[in-house]
Amino acid sequence: MLRDLREQGTTALIASPSPADLAQIGDRTIILKEGRIVDDRQEVNA
């Protein structure tokens, strides 16, 4: 389902304690601390 949404150009925000599990799905990593963006990358670290 997430891949279909991405192909349609839909933006989804997914929180995960293990971001590497989402590496094949996502195209951006945003790290939040206390609700504030502390890191914003155009890549997903596997």
Image: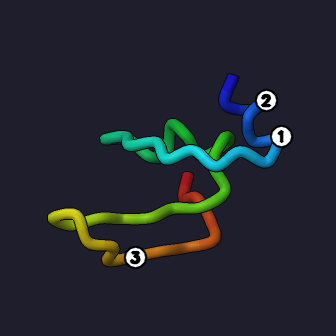
Q: Nearer the viewer, mark 1 or mark 3?
A: 1
Say what amino acid the circle numbered 1 marks: Gln
Whichever of labels 1 and 3 marks the residue nearer the N terminus, that label is 1
Closer to the camera in the image, 10 or 34: 10
Q: From the image, tell me which residue sits under label 3.
A: 39
Relative to 42, residue 7 above or below: above
Helix, strand, or loop for circle 3?
Answer: strand
Q: From the image, tell me which residue sits under label 2.
A: 4
Relative to 30, residue 24 above or below: above
Q: Residue at x 32, y 77 (%)?
A: 38
Q: Quadrant of the N terminus?
A: top right
Q: Residues within 10 Å of mark 2 (few under 14, many from 20)?
A: few
Closer to the camera in the image, 18 or 32: 32
Which mark, by number, is residue 29? none
Question: Where residue 30 appears, x then y in whole percent?
Answer: 44, 64
Q: Nearer the viewer, mark 3 or mark 2?
A: 2
Say what amino acid the circle numbered 2 marks: Asp
Q: From the image, tell me which residue sits under label 1.
A: 8
Relative to 33, residue 11 above or below: above
Say what amino acid the circle numbered 3 marks: Asp
How far apart are the alpha carbons under marks 2 and 1? Answer: 6 Å
Question: Where residue 46 appears, x then y in whole percent?
Answer: 55, 51
Relative to 18, residue 43 above or below: below
